Image: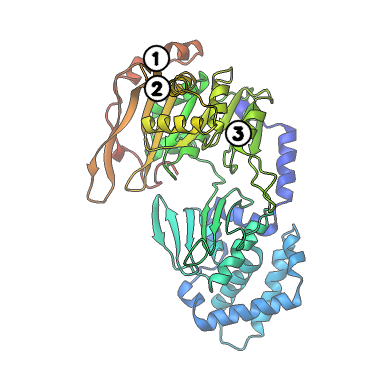
Amino acid sequence: MADPKEIVTKEKLDDAEARWSTVPAWEKRRRGSNQSQDRAAATRPEINYAREHSPEFEEIKTRVHRELIDRLDLNTLTERQDDGAVDEVRGIVRTLISEETAPLNLEERELIVELVLNEVFGLGPLEPLLQDAEVSDILVNTCDNVFVERNGRISKTNVRFRDNDHLLQVIDRIVSAVGRRIDDQSPMVDARLSDGSRVNAIVPPLSIDGPHLSIRKFRNDALSAADLIRSGALTEDMHEFIEGCVKARLNVLISGGTGAGKTTLLNVMSEAIPANERIVTIEDSAELQLRQPHVVRLETRPPNVEGSGQVTQRQLTINALRMRPDRIILGEVRGAEAVDMMQAMNTGHDGSLTTLHANGPRDALSRLETLVSMAGLNIAEKAIREQIASAIDLVIHVARLSDGTRRVTTISEIVGMEGQVVSMQELFAFERDGIDEAGAVVGRFTATGIRPKYAERLREYGVQLGESLFSNLGGYRAADFETSGGGVR
């Protein structure tokens, strides 16, 4: 019998095909490049940034681009959904380059073609970085300082824009595609590329030195549990326990810092949700990639230029309760929606999952208490803590270590209240021993030897976990795993 997780309804396929048909040709080209970096590198010329940014080369590229604009209605071309638009422009650009008197070899001609296509159909100088599958974050600090994150480490690139006006044009192209604007009156904006990548931009007068742009790239190929285990983010035993907790419908809070891998772990955990359950996801920016057939995806909406029309996570959480969900997944709790999330967890919507920015499990509970108080309901501190102790069953903390790797550093369960304090006990931990000569973090995963309070509930849901799972992990060391992938990304 086929695995229920692999069953895809005809309606789902038709919906996916309909969405794909609306993706512009240049975006299809980018996504294909993301799926295979080697294939992408083989099909486009390697950009020589020293040559590209030379005054002569910049002048030729600008002149060709300007002549292209004079000849064609680029607005009509970029709105077309067929691959012929890219090929049509490519042919015209080659013709314009052949009319240039400057001596250019074949490689340089093709480079200019690629750069002009990036300006017309893509995001200019950033396009090669968006096509690079190893890049997870792109950070632009004004026109001539572009940084990327690869495998958890940030490094400066040779990419740069012609000037700050050129960077502003690219930012405006991104935000206008989602119906937003960025200018002196509205100098900050959050947006999303059509492939799901998160974008934040801030411009003068708020940013003193010039425009700043941050892009958190969206993976088309979501990491699996096997990927996390192989990269050393957690062990097989830890994953077996986490998977069992999801199947047993425990409410789980994932905590961690920015870029620690909270959403990635949330995606992996969601794989254990049965295919016959109705799942409602609520996010500020849609990132979750659930594979179940019965998923309702909700996303917040910012206010329009008049300052109205905003839809918050709290409003969506309240609305989700009326949609007959079996589980609610809140991408990240960051405001007053925390009180509604806990109410849902305490009123029959067990098995819900969410993430929270915090430095540790105990800090996560303190921050959750603060977020609940932001709802303005004047609830006593002890009552809030009792609600937390009743709603949350498990806290999983992930961290990005100094060597760039991401690991699950703590798995703790909440066992109740002791006086005024929420009582927790640690089940699994990553113990650090130091740093080796190469700068890699040395450590090992261990079990604390405490049997979880919810062991009986796990058995009731058919989850059989061996006694040895909680007594000893055999001293799994970080060096026992492949760390080139940077752990959780």
Closer to the camera, 327 or 112? 327
386 w.r.t. 157: above or below: above
Q: Which residue is mark 3?
A: 314
Q: Which residue is mark 1?
A: 453
Give SS at disc 1: loop
Callout 3 amino acid: Arg
The mark that comes first in sequence, 1 or 2, is 2
Asked whether residue 124 appears in the rendered view, the answer is: no
Q: Are marks 1 and 2 in contact (CB under 8 Å)?
A: yes
Q: CA distance from mark 3 to mark 1?
A: 31 Å
Given residues 327 and 388, the one toward you in this image is 388
Write the residue at 48% across / 53% down.
Answer: 137
The mark found on residue 246 in the picture is none
- Give the amino acid at mark 2: Glu
Measuring from the top left, give residue 143's x and y in whole percent: 50, 69
Residue at screen point 51% across, 38% down: 334
Q: Nearer the viewer, mark 2 or mark 3?
A: 3
Q: Which is nearer the eye, 28 or 333?
A: 333
